[in-house]
Amino acid sequence: MSTASLPSRRVDAGFEVVGVRIASGGPLFVVAGPCSVESFEQYRAAAMAVHSAGADLLRGGAFKPRTSPYAFQGLGQEGLEIMRAVADELSMGVVTEALTVDDVPAITRYADMIQIGARNMANRPLLQAVADAGRPILLKRGMTAPVEELVTAAESLVGFGNEAVAVCERGSRTSEPSLRNTLDITAIAEMKLLSGLPVVVDPSHGTGRTDLVQAAACAGIAAGADGIMVEVHPHPARALSDGFQSLPTEDFTEFMRSVRSIAAAVGRET
Amino acid sequence: MTAAGGALTVMFDDAARPEELEAALGHAEDCGLTARVTRGDGWAVLAVPEGADEKMAGDFRGAPHASRVRFISSPYPLASLETTGDHSSFDIRGTLPAGGRLSIGSTAPVVTLIDVGSERGRDESGPRHAADSARRAGGAVWHAGSHGSWGTGASGRVDLLAARDAALECGVALSVGVTDRRALEEAHSIADMFQIEGRDMQNFDLLRALGQVGVPVVLRRGQGATIEEFLLAAEYVLAGGNGRVALCEGAAARPAWGPRFEINALLLLKRLTHLPVIADVSGCSEHNSAIAATACAAIAAGADGVLLPVAGDASYSGGRLAPEQCRASLHDMARVAAAVGRVMNPALPEGEEAPSPPLLVKQKRSRNAKREEPAASAVDVLHRLDGTLADAIRSATEITPKLEVINQKRISPPYQRWLTWLLKPEGDLLVRWTSYKLDRLTVTHNLSYVDFARVDGTVLARLQAEQLNLGELFAASAIDKFGFAFGTGADAGPLDAALREGHLDNALHPYVWRRYIASTSGRVGFLVIEALPTLTWQRLLASVTTREGTKT
């Protein structure tokens, strides 16, 4: 009689981003920071808070894919410079999203890992450009993409010659009116099984509600996720984007304690 | 004083006597208002949905054993967490072993419920076998299936007395699904708990009837129902007086891109209602490891119970756990439960270890783990792989891949030189492109040539009728495989064009391949090429046990 094997049983070498090991079955890693870089002060406050609570990598958006054309679109080049300066001060790596092929050279200069967002999961020219840039890649699952399509998109990144790829579950569309997205917790295990790649859970987009973020992150780790990507803001109510799903910095220490206890329970290094 | 707006709710502690609750109801009615009382174990709640004022609230604050009085805006005042301030629990009445007590809720252990099924239908092996499977799987509750009074014969009905006896013998509580009033009456004195299917979530007649009984009810969310609609359905049962209601989330039919088990719904329910919440992870995935992982996640998210799908029949694979597999995965769930301050019911005996490596094990980093050239190492592993690809995939993932015949045709000479050189055909060849698939994910691209002149006619006929898989043929019979070659897409040469001719998708990213020719009784009759996408296989093959030497 065979026993079901969670794919986390398999450990592969993975890759490193500024000293942080990212591997399927490897140690838990946490990527945290605000949705958007809004100012040097805002970004530095968020980064200092997540750094002191034990986050491994910083996140932040300089180019933002906003649903409305009238919403804050990000600081662009200035945002990249702010992130780099703060990341260097803290000796941390930083992850940011590339929206277009044209953004890639600048982002490659300033960021340590490049995110391909949910809306661009199947954007082949962008996948090619990001793969060619040579930086590690965080590939998010499209909000209506089956798991197999995400795996195929990851395959194509590898096919373009870049194997430092992690995939991210960030929630699907839902008909529930009180939610922005619905986190596909089962997909985390399936993504590991079908791709063998490191899997990241994004509880911020996965729930769209600050009050659910911590529990969703814990569930993601229990389901086998290797890492977490979470939005943290010094003043969520004043955030220019995604304040409703951002953790306030003062809650982040408790967040880290909570996810680490689940990680320990499932036998992971933290 | 004017009405204060919203519903007035009064929470009573466990010392409240029925006549005191009656008196409270009577008081509201004397004021011309409608009130409802619901009772669980150790608690009771009264709600006046509309029209109550501050004076009435004051009267209730002074009532005996009233512990909490609130005006709340929730449309489901009896179910609302605002009303009680804390999560509730109730007892499941017991066909339990002596001394056993089974409760569900935040103060109780996480309850394991087991649904036993098989490909051949639920009742094939009999209730005794099913209840025993539930027990071996580590279940506290056995769900015996849905009992409806619309059918005749075995279909849609549970042999209630046999189920009762089986549950008693095996020491598990008995859950029965009911679909209408008549089924409810038949099962009323027999089942320990009722389960209401999602399609009956808004069967209001049934919900009213359930409100009149003292039997615990597990209410499932209907497909596409919102959380508010779900809680209002629970409110129907509560308003009838029955406070022993648990909500069950999961296993809805959803589009391919969305989750079939919605963890967010579980998270919302835990924040909106005091009622216990059960996570049904059956049907959430075809992959058993993903089902077990989802159950762990649900416990981390606060589930008070998990409903697990168990196979009652060894022939069943995919989507249902074998009883022993289920029991082994309970160890992982228990560890997660402990991390959130819970235990499991039933508790696994002290010292019982998972019979094989647990699902989630302490990872040890290999000091020597170095990144190698992917193609090179994949080729290397492939070179040492002795056996069929199907076996390799199964050993790596514990999933049996599905073979899909993409295309096949009969071709006649003249052939390309590389083909004649390898196969030396004298006449027509059968050429066949196939793929192994895990769900919809293509994990191999295969190409084979079969020589009509040199292969047994029966075998050939079955191959042509797509009844025979070459992998099975090679595994099963005395076939000699030789002429092995290995390589990457870059050095595939004419093989590359041949593969791409039939596998029209452009999914042939960097790949590695293995090629061999095979014979039956000394006559070379087959040429087989297997192409494997590098990323997938890099990882699959890393976990395949390989043996030196491939020549047979």
Image (tube, helix red, strand yellow):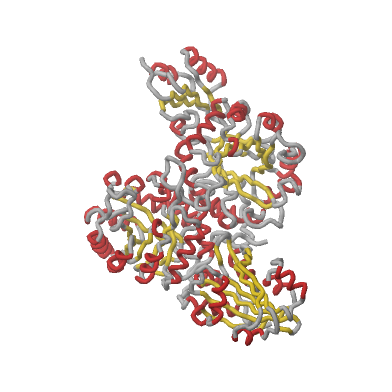
Name of the residue lying farthest toward the top: B30
Asked whether A192 or B439 is in front, the reply is B439
The residue lying at 59 percent from left, 50 percent from top is: B283
Number of numbered tags placed on the structure image:
0
In the image, residue A211 lies at what x, y percent?
39, 44
Q: Is residue A59 left or right of residue A220?
A: left
Asked whether the viewer can see residue A25, the reply is: no
In the image, residue B440 lies at what x, y percent?
56, 60
Position above or below: B49 against B501? above
The residue lying at 61 percent from left, 25 percent from top is: B212
Asked whether B8 or B341 is in front, the reply is B8
In the image, residue A124 lies at what x, y percent?
41, 65
Asked whether the viewer can see residue B408, the reply is: yes
Position above or below: A213 against A5? above
Q: Which image quadrant for residue B247? A: top right
Q: Is residue A42 left or right of residue B482?
A: left
Position above or below: B219 against A190? above
Asked whether B371 or B98 is in front, the reply is B371
Quadrant location, the N terminus of chain A: bottom right
The residue lying at 43 percent from left, 54 percent from top is: A170
Quadrant location, the C terminus of chain A: bottom left
Asked whether B140 or B2 is in front, the reply is B2
In the image, residue B120 lies at what x, y percent?
72, 51
Position above or below: B281 against B423? above
Q: Is residue A12 left or right of residue A4?
A: left
The residue lying at 47 percent from left, 74 percent from top is: B369
